[in-house]
Amino acid sequence: MLGGQFVSRVNLNLREDKGYTYGARTGFNYRRGPGPFTSAGVFTNVTKESVAELLKELRGIRGDIPITENELEYAKQGFLGPREVIQLLHVALLFHFPFSIIIIHCRSLPPQC
């Protein structure tokens, strides 16, 4: 809702409304300990304005502009499909076990994965 999907608040603001970037995302870098919160790159000449907009979106989603029912429903429909689960597993395994060889058998997942 904040920055993980194309129709997220950050992307709609920075890309669609302001034209500051080709695409904006937000997320956490998964590490063994706490990792940084990151956002996608923007054009250099609008960095200051982009940071202000990102902070506005963070404040908004924390309470000034609550998540709407439509945002929540859209996120539910698109977030926990089989592909997203595999992506989350991949990121978690890659960053939490960087020196391990991990094999995941996906035979029970739907064919579109």
Image (cartoon, rainbow, N blue to C red):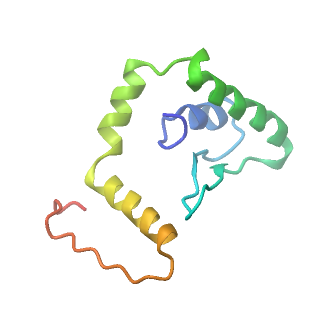
Outermost residue on the front side: it is 33
Q: Is residue 21 left or right of residue 106?
A: right
Residue 51 visible, this orientation: yes
Q: Left or right of 87: which side holds 13?
A: right
Q: Could you say which is closer to the camera, residue 28 or residue 44?
A: 28
- Please state the total of marks drawn on the protein image: 0
Q: Residue at x 57, y 51 (%)?
A: 28
What residue occupies the far left of the structure in this picture? 108
The spot of residue 91 in percent (x, y) is 46, 63
**Which residue is at 61% across, 22% downward?**
60
Q: Residue furthest toward the top?
A: 64
Residue 3, picture quadrant: top right
**Vertical arrangement, residue 68 with respect to residue 9, above or below:** above
Instruction: Report the front residue among 28 and 34.
Output: 34
Image quarter for residue 76?
top left
Above/below status of 99 relative to 65: below
User: Which corner quadrant holds the C terminus?
Assistant: bottom left
Residue 33 rendering spot, x and y as whole percentages: 59, 60
Give the vertical position of 75 relative to 96 (above or below).
Answer: above
Residue 99 horizontal/vertical position (percent): 50, 82
Please give left or right for residue 50 compared with residue 102 in the image: right
x, y percent for residue 1: 48, 34
Viewer-closest of 3 and 66: 66
Question: Foreground residue, 21 or 102?
Answer: 102
Can you see residue 39?
no
